[in-house]
Image (cartoon, rainbow, N blue to C red):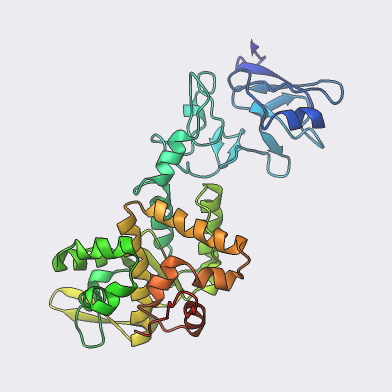
Amino acid sequence: MMTINQAGLMTNRLQLTQPSAAGLKARKSPRLTRRCGAVSLAPLRANRRYHYDVFGNNYTGSLAGSNSLGYAGKRYDPATSFYDYGFRDYDSTTGRFTTVDPIRDGYNWYAYCNNDPVIFFDLWGLKPAQDKPYSLDAYEYQLRTNNGLLKQAVEELAHKGQDIIPYSSLLDNNGKSATARFANALTSEAGLSVLQDSTRAYVTNLSRTELVDSLNKANLVTGIDMNDVSNEIDRLNRMGVNVQFDPTKRDAFSISGYVFTSENTNSIVSQKEIGNQTYYMINDEETMRLLYHEDTHYQSALATGNEYQWFENYNNEFQKNLANGMSKDKAYYSLSDEREAYSFGPYNSEAETNFNDPKTGDKYIKW
């Protein structure tokens, strides 16, 4: 019921009743029965009534103790005074979300309900709706497209590193293009023999110039703080990406065209000026093989046609390996994409042990 309070503000009068265990079991989640609204489930105790203004500021009743479901049926945290909208928290005192909109909808990524919660509502902290509850379909689309949420999140993470170095500026220890050398390795007889069918088809359908250009699309990010990576992985998992690896146990990893390493720039490359261009000479062969490994992943993702789909396939295979009783290490080294990438380096004794399979005849190739 809409009322005018003594300060002359339009308010929403909300009625909330405590759910019983049976009521919660019967429904997966509370249903809004009106905008910015009311939640009504089977009562456990006497009804309690709370009054809010349209932005969710409670002025009658208390949400302390067990009364954790408040404005719009969202869980209230008395420690922070924020409401949990699933994808981010909402601060009713400012009328704004506490973090940026994961799907970057509209122009103001912190505003709540377009600053008009009388007309709009937002069930998830993603996008305000007006006529019907917002489904997750649009979110899923944003997540799964090449230029969607995954890419945006990774680009934000990349800018927290020390340097972003395009693969196109990398030189081998002879001062030659590192990606041109890698193109030779990929298209050699031995290289093509270890590629997955989809990657092999992608590579062989490109001209040499196109292949080098494709390899050059990757970027090396140095000096990344693994704590930043862990925080970003947590955020990606909340967004549904389902990242399955522990970054602290990796020398390097790649997501969406970016190769991340905690190593400082000077420890892996040496800057070199040629004309008006800045290049980076890779300091040793082992580092070069590590970068080849990660760029192999990127080419495999490009071959899939959708980087998010590649990432999802990778995680699904990892989960399947675990379900088949493999240890985490065995599950990782048995992945199709890791078998492919480790064939180009760096040499890894564990990979060699896990790749040599007498049943299938598969063998680890020491490049």
Q: Is residue 19 visible?
A: no
Residue at (20% x, 85% y) in the render: 175
User: What is the residue that sits farthest to the left in this orientation?
Assistant: 275
Residue at (86% x, 21% y) in the render: 46
User: What is the residue that sits farthest to the front in this orientation?
Assistant: 359
Measured from the top left, where is residue 147 in percent x and y?
34, 48
Residue 98 picture quarter: top right
Comparing 122 with 194, the one in front is 194
User: 197 above or below 276?
Assistant: above
Measured from the top left, where is residue 298 in percent x and y?
34, 63
Residue at (54% x, 23% y) in the render: 117
**Could you tell whether 6 is left or right of 197 in the image?**
right
Comparing 105 with 361, the one in front is 361
**Could you tell whether 212 is left or right of 140 in the image?**
left
Figure quadrant of the C terminus: bottom left
User: 139 above or below 147?
Assistant: above
User: 70 above or below 236?
Assistant: above
User: 47 above or below 22?
Assistant: above
User: What is the residue that sits farthest to the right in this orientation?
Assistant: 45
Measured from the top left, where is residue 68 in percent x and y?
75, 35
Q: Is residue 14 visible?
A: yes
Measured from the top left, where is residue 21 in percent x and y?
81, 32
Comparing 288 with 18, the one in front is 288
Count of numbered tags: 0
Figure quadrant of the N terminus: top right
**Could you tell whether 21 is left or right of 255 in the image?**
right
